[in-house]
Image (cartoon, rainbow, N blue to C red):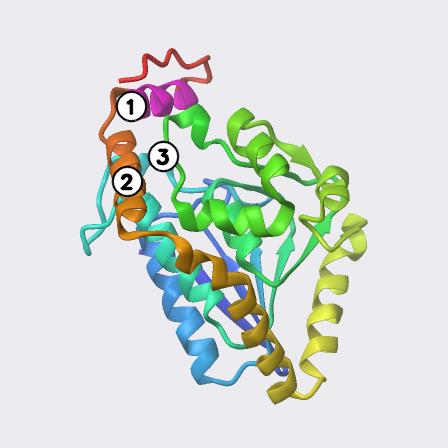
Amino acid sequence: MAPRVRAEDHGPVRVLVLENAGKRNALDFQALDELEAACAAATADAVRCLVLRGAGDDAFSSGFDLAEISLTSARGERPDEAVERAAAALDEVPCPTVAFLNGGAFGGGFELAATCDLRVARAGVKLGMPPAKLGVVYPEGGLRRFLDLVGAARTRELFYTGRPIDSDTALAWGIVNRVVPAEAAEADALALAAEIAANAPLAVRGMKRILRLLEGAHERGLSDAERAEIAELRRRAFESADIREGRAAWQERRPARFKGE
């Protein structure tokens, strides 16, 4: 089976390329396992800045592959759990991370971009969170990433409507750090990564660690009962008729007929 994540080194900068030909770089269990391993390798190799992008010029990632959404991984994980594991691995990389949004990013692909420290978008890309259109209750870790990034009101709009936003809106909302014309976007993202990598690595890593501790402090406020409630909400959604209807409607390009069951 062809690799789903390819690594390219540019001096102290490493670029991880999500690659799933014919599926707009969709994520599957193999891709998420490979991304977790690639993040561990970047840490072991003391990479100074890590860039995440999609292969080609059309898509960063279309999200989790609907062909596997009803499956479980070799570890017994549902798709949402596998995405959260990969996002956590990306979050734990000690050096700064940059998402180069070379194309559209949706669902789990959008979450991976949101997990990175910085985001550079090619002008005209679309970003979206469609779980409500698929009957999925998104996990609390992913929702928290967007709360931290854009605040409660805009997180609600992204997740409740499932409506994509364009790159200019993403810039205005603070989701991306900059929007760059298509012909210059890749060079801009790599230049930003190289600028970061040229700084003192202990200082940069130390500041990243402190920022992560400050951002994550509020998560310790969830009680065991609240975490159990969240887990039950996610389990019920993944076992529902609505998730099957959402997947079928998406594949058949028709409006979904959800029944709340």
SS under mark 2: helix
* Mark 3 residue crowding within 10 angstroms, few (<14) / some (14–19) / many (20+): some
Q: Position of residue 107 (x, y in %)?
A: 48, 40
Question: Identity of the amino acid at label 2?
Answer: Glu
* Residue annotated with mark 3: 66
SS under mark 3: helix
SS under mark 1: helix
Q: Position of residue 9 (x, y in %)?
A: 57, 76
Question: Identity of the amino acid at label 3?
Answer: Leu
Indicate whether residue 84 is drawn in magenta: no
* Residue annotated with mark 2: 229
Q: Mark 2 or mark 3: which comes first in sequence?
A: 3
What is the magenta segment's predominant secondary structure? helix
Residue 237 seen in the figure: yes
- Mark 1 and 2 residues: CB-CB less than 8 Å, in contact? no
Q: Position of residue 21 (x, y in %)?
A: 46, 46
Question: Identity of the amino acid at label 1?
Answer: Arg
Range covered by the magenta-colored residues? 242-251
Residue 2 seen in the figure: no
Q: Mark 1 or mark 2: which comes first in sequence?
A: 2
Image quarter where the C terminus lies is top left
How far, Cα to Cα, is label 2 from label 3? 26 Å
* Residue annotated with mark 1: 244
How far, Cα to Cα, is label 1 from label 3? 10 Å
